[in-house]
């Protein structure tokens, strides 16, 4: 039985990862600040379900507050840390940049310090497909250069990868970053497309379709994300003996450091995604076509060969099944 810290435990991915770890018998301390970026009731309802499980403890805490976080690391002596806490959202970063600096940069450095000073065996942390930024070569590979972010959110996630590598190099802290691709499913975030579209269609309001529907996304169901996170957490990254300083591979290192994509490896046209929601709601969407939003990218597509080779897993939940399960949850939770 491992003792695991999951930050962002009341969040969408954090809730599901915590539940999975508890089900297999791990001891989980969940940390979250329960901020009001979206409906706090949804976060509290996720948290209440976790609190019913044996082996779960909760701390309401800010990652950016160093002293209480260090006391937590000192008293708990975690085996593994899974950092899923972050200020999320591309568009919100255009108007609230300081929230990203505080949570995603200052908070992440504090996590690294806690791991460094208190013997954590493995740090697993959420990065994002947004780090690929201006890249257009598909599918996106961890071996591609990612030096051209197009949103502040993406820049903070790229910074997390650089910071983690530095600690891996200097202090031999095993660290694995996971680039998530458009995660959706039950208990999802209300600011994401599946939630926004479903809510608007049910309420008879038009949905906002950016880039006039000419978007492609590698939608990844939450169960596949969780499976990837847990498998990766169980595997310590190893230095790559073939890594060369003459031709450095962005996806490898001579430190105990790895990066993986977790995506469905099947990009979906946005219009097909909307059709799938319409099908399972039994209702047609009224659409408001809009131009591309600042900070957005036209397409995402995950190369998952490294993930499959190292942990033997490829996401496999189809969009049709995933949307059906999301809408079933939505109708039950909101009683519609």
Image (cartoon, rainbow, N blue to C red):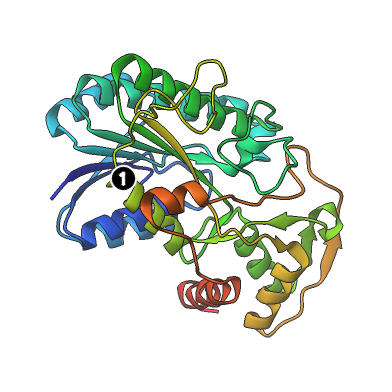
How far across and how far down the image is residue 146, in percent? 63, 30
How far across and how far down the image is residue 5, in percent? 26, 40
Q: Quadrant of residue 215?
A: bottom right
Callout 1 crowding tier (Cα within 10 Å): few <14, some 14–19, many ≥20? many
- Residue in the foreground of this view, choosing between 13 and 10: 13
Residue 205 in the figure: left or right of residue 92: right
Q: Which residue is rendered at x = 36% and y = 59% of the image? A: 46
Query: Compared to 234, does 265 lie above or below?
Result: below
- Residue in the foreground of this view, choosing between 181 and 285: 181
Q: Which residue is rendered at x = 39% and y = 36% of the image? A: 176
How far across and how far down the image is residue 11, in percent? 42, 50
Residue 328 seen in the current view: yes
Residue highlighted by disc 1? 233
Residue 264 in the figure: left or right of residue 238: right
How far across and how far down the image is residue 232, in percent? 35, 47
Residue 106 seen in the current view: no
Query: Compared to 214, does 178 lie above or below?
Result: above
Query: Compared to 305, does 198 lie above or below?
Result: below
- Residue in the foreground of this view, choosing between 310 and 111: 310
Q: Which residue is rendered at x = 70% and y = 47% of the image? A: 138
- Residue in the foreground of this view, choosing between 2 and 30: 2
How many discs appear? 1
Q: Which residue is rendered at x = 51% and y = 16% of the image? A: 245
Element assignment for label 1: helix
């Amino acid at each position: 039985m491992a003792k695991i810290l999951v930050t962002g435990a009341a969040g969408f991915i954090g809730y599901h990862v915590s539940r999975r770890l508890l089900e297999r018998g791990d001891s989980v301390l969940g940390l979250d600040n329960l901020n009001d970026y979206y409906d706090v009731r949804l976060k509290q309802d996720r948290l209440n379900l976790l609190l019913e499980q044996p082996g779960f403890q909760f701390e309401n805490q800010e990652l950016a507050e160093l002293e209480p976080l260090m006391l937590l690391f000192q008293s708990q002596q975690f085996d593994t840390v899974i950092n899923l806490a972050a200020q999320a959202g591309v568009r919100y970063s255009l108007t609230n940049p300081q929230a990203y600096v505080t949570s995603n940069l200052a908070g992440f450095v504090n996590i690294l310090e806690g791991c460094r000073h208190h013997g954590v065996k493995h740090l697993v942390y959420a990065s994002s497909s947004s780090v690929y930024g201006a890249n257009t070569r598909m599918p996106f590979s961890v071996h591609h250069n990612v030096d051209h972010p197009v949103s502040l959110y993406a820049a903070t996630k790229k910074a997390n990868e650089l910071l983690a590598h530095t600690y891996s190099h200097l202090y031999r802290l095993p660290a694995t970053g996971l680039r998530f691709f458009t995660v959706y499913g039950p208990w999802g975030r209300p600011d994401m497309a599946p939630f926004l579209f479903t809510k608007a269609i049910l309420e008879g309001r038009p949905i906002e379709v950016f880039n006039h529907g000419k978007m492609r996304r590698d939608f990844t169901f939450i169960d596949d994300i969780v499976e990837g996170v847990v498998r990766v957490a169980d595997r310590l990254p190893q230095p790559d003996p073939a890594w060369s300083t003459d031709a450095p591979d962005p996806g490898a290192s001579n430190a105990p450091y790895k990066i993986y994509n977790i995506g469905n490896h099947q990009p979906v046209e946005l219009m097909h995604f909307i059709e799938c929601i319409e099908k399972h709601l039994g209702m047609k969407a009224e659409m408001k076509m809009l131009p591309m939003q600042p900070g957005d990218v036209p397409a995402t597509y995950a190369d998952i060969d490294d993930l499959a080779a190292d942990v033997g897993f490829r996401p496999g939940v189809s969009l049709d099944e995933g949307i059906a399960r999301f809408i079933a949850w939505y109708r039950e939770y909101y009683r519609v």
